[in-house]
Image (cartoon, rainbow, N blue to C red):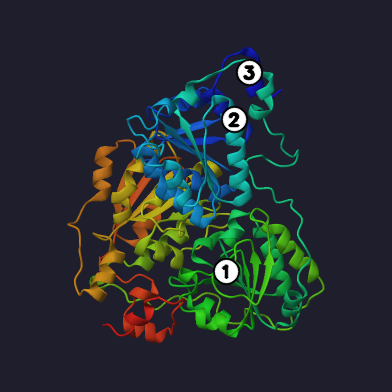
Amino acid sequence: MASTELQLLSGTATGATTAVGALVEAGVKHLFAVHGANCEDIFAAAQGRHSDLRTVVAKHEFSAVAMADGYFRASCRLAAAMTTSGGGSLNALAALGEAAASGVPLLALLGEPPSNLAGKGAFQDQSGSAGSMDLAHAVQAVGAWCERVNSPLRLAGSIRRAVAAALRERRPAAILVPKDVQQGSIALVPAVADDVSRATPSPDRDPGMLDVSQPHPELPSGARCALEEAQRIVIIAGLDVVLTDSREALQTLAELLGAAVAVEPDAMDAYDNHAPNFVGVLGAMGHPSAREAIARADLCLAVGARLGQMATTGIADLLAARTLLHVGSRPPWLTAQHHVPAPSSALTPAIHQVTACLSRRRMRVAATDGPHLSHLPVPRPSRGQLSYRDFAEAISASVGAGTTVVADAGNTGSAAVHYIRTPAENGRFILALGMGGMGFSFGAGIGAMLATGKRSYVIAGDGSFLMHGLEIHTAIEYRMPITFIIVNNDGNAACSGRERLILHQANIFRHSTLAGGIGAMFSAIDARRASSVSTLRSMIEETDGDGGTHLIEVCIPNDAHPPYLPLLPAEIIEQHPTAPAVPGNDLEGYRDRD
């Protein structure tokens, strides 16, 4: 008998305890929360189930949701986040929007004031009644599934529906839980047992993971003919390969086709970065070798890739001139001549179907006879200072096998994508480009570490650090093996770079000593500044074996050029011809500026 049913029979259940029981029964093992008055009942119940459900107290609600997001990206396992009402739930919206845009399933429990005070002047009223804000509408507006619960008898059933929707539709699901619903007692009512008991999972599937067993239709004849007739094929792997854990299926297909493989910027770990047929990253922060591979190809096979602006900057003209075949659940932004549909949670069967139809195929011409991996010709900083390439390649050479790299937005993220390869032996690389919010990496790195049990390397600029960097405190409190590498360039350097191009001026911060400040604040962290490549490499290597939390600060000039096409000087762009990715891309305008 399910634990929730036992609570019913004993007469001890409340809405909060049945909610926690439903989380455990759904396979959720971590709850990331910022506790508060209108979620404290569920939080207390969760702490009472510490052997089944680990609670992690975050410092900001944005980061709590980012932790659940990073957890899934690193493991394809569902996690939950929880906030209180008012400002707490509103702080979570930005991260819910990122998860929705990227197709990341997670569960959010958002507390609310007692339902009998809705529309009657309740503190933090978000019911939508009597002129108050409507949180349900706000949550739905950012792309999340949402349900407000009005009875403790229905709470466990709502959680089951939310989990099913999140995994089936691959998006966040939120449940709004008023205070009285959490506190309400549930007496012995046999008729409601079906609503609060555990949904029986398939014996061979973890209930907190995607169902990839769905059947898939035959490969359309037009798509099959295009693949069989193509001489040179480039596979473009997207984030959906990562989020549906379809890496092995993709590797088998690539080997069968003899195809080169490029990845979208937020899908770095979709394919082995050390494989001989890996040609790099596409788009604004991508590699010339990826563009060259597409230029030589006559067919591009997009697998789980949507081909948005960040991925197609510089290659949209080439893609338009080639046969494009797409496999996936979400259609690409560019027109594909052939589309092989797949359920949101089951990309692997679709890839297997393509492979099965081509099992006797032999490639006549290898697609990887060009350069393996090449980089943008980015100018070095003057005065012999460290460059983005210096710090990123030092990290790439030093991180341990099987670990996770989590990169933030901006110039630092561009450098990480361009110069760092995903760690070997099934390592992970996380970059949130759905909304591209700064500071996301601090929470996501914590979630990824808990999902994998291995060290995470969080790479962020000082601008991102000043937004959400004090989430480092959470890693310290829980003694997590995470290395935070902060690139201090005295400002939001991506913004400064655009300002120099457009306004001929730049907003720069007064210099801060971030490692010294964090070391002074938190005695339990090893916080140091690396002034050279050799020092940085030795510091990273020292962190691998001790299991502690570390921070390394690296200083780079604010005007250093990142490997990002729109911010490179005109003469560099001329050396690397590009074209607008989609209407409205302002890359063309940069060519006419100094």
Q: Furthest residue to the left?
A: 510
Quarter holding residue 522: top left
Callout 3 amino acid: Leu
From mark 2 to mark 1, how far is it between C-alphas?
37 Å
Q: Is residue 114 left or right of residue 452?
A: left
- Foreground residue among 571 and 81: 81
User: The disc labelled 2 sits on which kind of residue?
Assistant: Ala
Who's the residue at 55% across and 28% down the image? 19
CA distance separating discs 2 and 3: 12 Å
Q: Are marks 3 and 1 in contact (CB under 8 Å)?
A: no
Task: Looking at the picture, tell me which residue is in the foreground, 360 or 196.
Answer: 196
Residue 551, numbered label: none
Which comes sooner in the sequence, label 2 or label 3?
3
Could you tell me residue 74's position as x and y percent?
Answer: 54, 50
Point 66% across, 81% down: residue:
232
Would you say residue 121 is visible in this rendering? yes
Quarter of the rendering containing residue 225: bottom right
The outermost residue toward the right is: 360
User: Alpha carbon of mark 3 to alpha carbon of mark 1: how far?
Assistant: 48 Å
Q: Which residue is mark 3?
A: 8
Q: Nearer the viewer, residue 194 or 291?
A: 194
- Residue 477 locus on image (x, y percent): 38, 34
Mark 2 lies on a secondary structure that is: helix
Pointers 2 and 1 in contact (C-beta within 8 Å): no
Dot 3: what SS?
A: helix
In the displayed structure image, the side of residue 136 where residue 489 appears, left or right: left
Count of numbered tags: 3
User: Which residue lies under the disc numbered 1?
Assistant: 332
Mark closer to the chain start, 2 or 1: 2
**Element type at mark 1:** loop
Residue that mark 2 sits on: 156
